[in-house]
Image: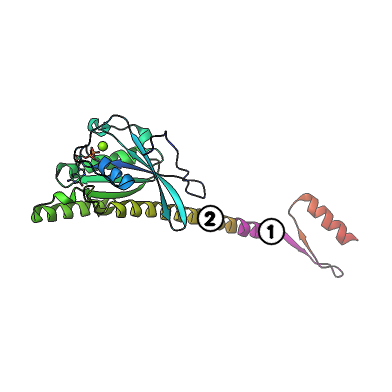
Amino acid sequence: MDNSSEESSDNESEGLKVIKIILLGQSGCGKTSIVLRWIDNSFTENTATTIGASFYLKNVLIGEKMIPIRLWDTSGQERFKSLAPLYYREAAGVILVLDTQDLLSLERLQYWMEEIKKNCNTLPVICLALNKHDLFSNQQQQEIIYEKSEKFAKKINAKFIKTSAKTGLGIDELFENIAKSIVQKHENHIKFRRFSECQSQITLNRQKKKKKKKNAVNIMNNKYPTRLLILKDTFCFIEALIIEN
Ligand SMILES: Nc1nc2c(ncn2[C@@H]2O[C@H](COP(=O)(O)OP(=O)(O)O)[C@@H](O)[C@H]2O)c(=O)[nH]1
Ligand SMILES: [Mg+2]
C-alpha cells in the first residue's frame, strides 16, 4: 500500500506515465474491499472506515509497457455525498461500484455520473462493477439486477463486470479491462492528433500552392518566355532584372 501524496497523470504527453483511477459508489458497496483484493489479495469481513482519501499504487504490464496505476479510494467521505474536486481531477478511469444487496445504490449511480461530468475535465473510461456477487441467493432477483445494471452500463457507455471482493471473482478482469481501455483511448487520442496535424499541413500546402498559381503571370517574350511570380515586390524586381539581361 502506498499513501504518498497526489501524483498527476501525464495524459497529454506521448507516454502515459501514471494512470489515475478513482472509485465511486455508495458507502458500504465494497470499494475498499475491491481495492484491497487487487492490491494485496486480501479480504476483511468488516472493514473499518477511516477518514481521508487513500492512495494505492500498482504497476501493471500492458502490452510491453509497465504502467503504474494509482487508485484513489474515498474512505468514507461519500457518506456525506460531496467529494473534493481534487478527487476527480485528471482521473483517466472511474470504477463505479454497485452493491447487489442494495437496490437503491443503482438509482444513486446517476448521481455519481452527474458528479463525474461536473468535475472531470474530460470524460474518463468508466467500468461498472456489480459487487458482492457471492451474496446472490435469489435467482429471480439476480436476473432483475443484471438487466438493470447492464442497461445502465450501456447508457453511460461503461463496461459491466460482475465482481466479488470476497471470492476474487472478476477483480483482475475489472482492473485489466479499465487499464487497457485507458491505454487504448490514449493511443487513439495521439493517433487522431497526429492525423489532424498532418491534415492541417496538407491544407496549408494546398493553400500555398493555390496562392502561388493565382499570383503567377506569364510574360511572353520571343527570346525568353518567362513566368513572373508576383509573391513580393522584391521578387518582381529580381525577375525583371533577369529578363532584361
Ligand atoms: N460478501 C461480501 N462482502 C463484501 C464484498 N465486498 C465488500 N464486502 C463487505 O462489505 C462491507 C463494506 O465494504 P467496504 O469495502 O468497506 O465498502 P466501501 O464503504 O464502499 O469502501 C465490509 O463489511 C466488507 O467486508 C463482497 O464482494 N462480498
Ligand atoms: Mg471504503
Q: CA distance from mark 1 to mark 2?
A: 27 Å
Observer-nearest of 224 and 20: 20
- Residue 215 image-quadrant placement: bottom right
Is residue 219 magenta-colored? yes
Residue 54: image x %, image y %?
34, 35
Residue 239 visible in the current orientation: yes
Query: Which residue in the protein does label 1 denote?
Result: 212
Residue 160: image x %, image y %?
26, 54
State the residue lying farthest toward the bottom.
222
From the image, which quarter does the C terminus lie in? bottom right
Residue type at mark 2? Arg
From the image, which quarter does the N terminus lie in? top left
Observer-nearest of 179 and 57: 57
Residue 237: image x %, image y %?
83, 53
Observer-nearest of 126 and 196: 126
Query: What stretch of residues is rendered in magenta?
Result: 204-226
- 89 relative to 153, above or below: above
Describe residue 25's horizontal placement relative to residue 56 as left or right: left
Q: Which mark is residue 194?
A: 2
